[in-house]
Amino acid sequence: MGKNSIFAQSLDRDRGVTIKSPRELEFMREAGKVVASVKRDLIDSIKPGMKTQELDDIAVECIQSMGAKPSFKGYLGFPRTICVSINEEIVHGIPGERVIQDGDLVSMDVGAVVGGFHGDSALTVGVGSISKEAENLMAVTETALDIGISKARNNARIGDVSHAIQTYIESKGLSVVRQYVGHGIGRALHEEPQIPNFGNLGTGPILRKGMVIAIEPMVNIGGWETEVMADNWTVVTADGSLSAHFEHTLAITDGDAEVLTRI
Ligand code: MG
Ligand code: MG
């Protein structure tokens, strides 16, 4: 076996579906708490005139103070601790010198590791006074996430979650990003199965108690098509329309899912 096949094998193993033990779930709860604290700090701090790098610095400080490690820094070469994506940027924006303006829609994605287990969560906030359309976009995206979570339980199909999210978003005249999807999560940031935000009832893998997944609808005011910017990271709407992103990490149980990244 050559190098490539060994790499492929380990990649495959890293990405497989995993059922977490009670002890592993404890670590995932702790990782979720760290991510929730970072989100709290970001919401409390964000204001017009700030550089996006300052948001990253706040996240670094919070993660370190809680004895955790960032999930994203160095992941596939990503250079910062959080992703900050503004207005038509959907996901994977790199914090830097950009200054946040009054009226911006700012999506922030946070990941942290505790005891080798990841937590992953995102939210979008309006800075200063934002348009009615932007308010509506954020509200629909957050509600779509809640609807998806409500469908995620033992023995449900992933298509049931996907379908509920897509149907709600499209009923509001907005579009769902296809290119990027939710995922299983655990020792690896991205594990199987994929959790698309679009799909058909009664299709896809079955969710089982002990699985932990991240559901993360990305919603655009215009079309669902995306492009990647020249930095090879920042994903934007192809038509330049506004986008919002909400994500939680949750554990599948016999009843309602246990959301691990709630503030
Ligand atoms: Mg995320
Ligand atoms: Mg994610």
Image (tube, rainbow, N blue to C red):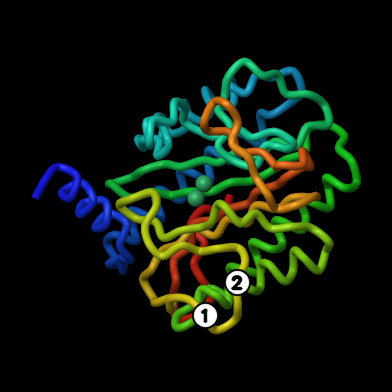
Residue assigned mark 2: 199
Hey, what amino acid is under mark 1? Thr
Q: Residue furthest left?
A: 1
Q: Residue at x 43, y 76 (%)?
A: 205
Residue 171, picture quadrant: bottom right
Residue 145 horizontal/vertical position (percent): 64, 61
Hey, what amino acid is under mark 2? Gly
Residue assigned mark 1: 203
The reply to whether the C-beta atoms of the residues labelled 1 and 2 are less than 8 Å apart is yes
Q: Residue at x 19, y 45 (%)?
A: 4
- Of the pair 2 and 252, the residue shown nearer to us: 2
- Of the pair 67 and 211, the residue shown nearer to us: 211
Q: Secondary structure at mark 1?
A: loop
Residue 48, picture quadrant: top right
In this orientation, does residue 41 appear? no
Q: Is residue 246 above or below residue 19?
A: above
Residue 64 horizontal/vertical position (percent): 40, 30
